Image (cartoon, rainbow, N blue to C red):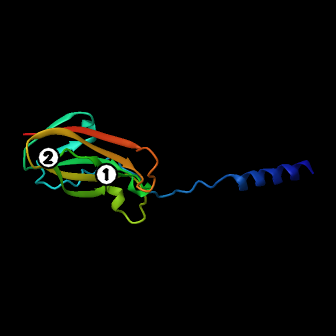
Amino acid sequence: MMRLIAVVCAMALCACTPAQEAKEETPVSNTQVPAPTPGEVATRITAEQNGQTVNVAVNERFAVELVGVPTAGYIWAPVTLPAFVQRAGGAGGNTVPEQSQPGYTGGNHWEVFMFVATEAGSGELVLEQRRPWETNEPASSTFRVTIVAQ
């Protein structure tokens, strides 16, 4: 009788152990896709330049390249523009190659904001990342850069 109980217990344990299946998953690479900033943009401002001063030429386009999480509703938007700076377009795209594969969901995405300085001046450009419908919530991130147009 003890043998029977031992065999039944052993079988029950084997049934509870997950099978070692070879799952084929698409690994996420560490290779980041560059920001989709058009080639004619003269100056590219990155997240690493947060809080810094950037010199730009009058009448040349410059871009701010930030990574956002629009799949979770968090998007970047300019909230403060110097009087001499105007919006000049935008672009967005994948941050890793796997985002182009069928079935890939979520993840971070590039958000590129293009501007042009219409005259010489100095002022702070501020962008905030937030969910647009959460109007009473503070921004989840803030990006600030002082633009000096010459």
Residue 20 place in picture, x, y as percent: 59, 53
List the residue tagged with mark 2. Answer: 84
Whether pointer 1 and pointer 2 mark residues with C-beta atoms closer than 8 Å, the reply is no
Residue 41 place in picture, x, y as percent: 13, 51
Which residue is nearer to you in this view: 150 or 16?
A: 150
Residue 14 place in picture, x, y as percent: 72, 53
Residue at x-position 41% and y-position 57%: 71
Left or right of 45? Residue 98 is right
Q: Quadrant of residue 143?
A: top left
Residue at x-position 8% and y-position 42%: 120
Left or right of 128? Residue 135 is right
Alpha-carbon neighbours of circle 2 within 10 Å: few (<14), some, or many (≥20)?
A: some
Helix, strand or loop at mark 1: strand
Placement of the C terminus among the 4 image quadrants: top left
Total numbered labels:
2
Query: Taking 50 as reference, is 97 above or below it?
Result: below
Tell me the tag on residue 144.
none
Which residue is nearer to you in this view: 11 or 36?
A: 36
Query: Which three-letter amino acid code belongs to the residue tagged 2?
Result: Phe
Helix, strand or loop at mark 2: loop
Left or right of 11? Residue 23 is left
Residue at x-position 46% and y-position 49%: 136
Query: Which three-letter amino acid code belongs to the residue tagged 1?
Result: Ala
Please report whichever mark, 1 or 2, sits nearer to the chain's N-terminal start: 1
List the residue tagged with mark 1. Answer: 77
- The answer to whether residue 114 is visible is yes
Left or right of 130? Residue 39 is left
As measured in the structure, the alpha-carbon distance from the residue carrying label 1 to the one carrying label 2 is 18 Å
Residue at x-position 25% and y-position 52%: 112
Residue 149 place in picture, x, y as percent: 10, 41
Give the farthest residue toward the right.
1
Alpha-carbon neighbours of circle 1 within 10 Å: few (<14), some, or many (≥20)?
A: some
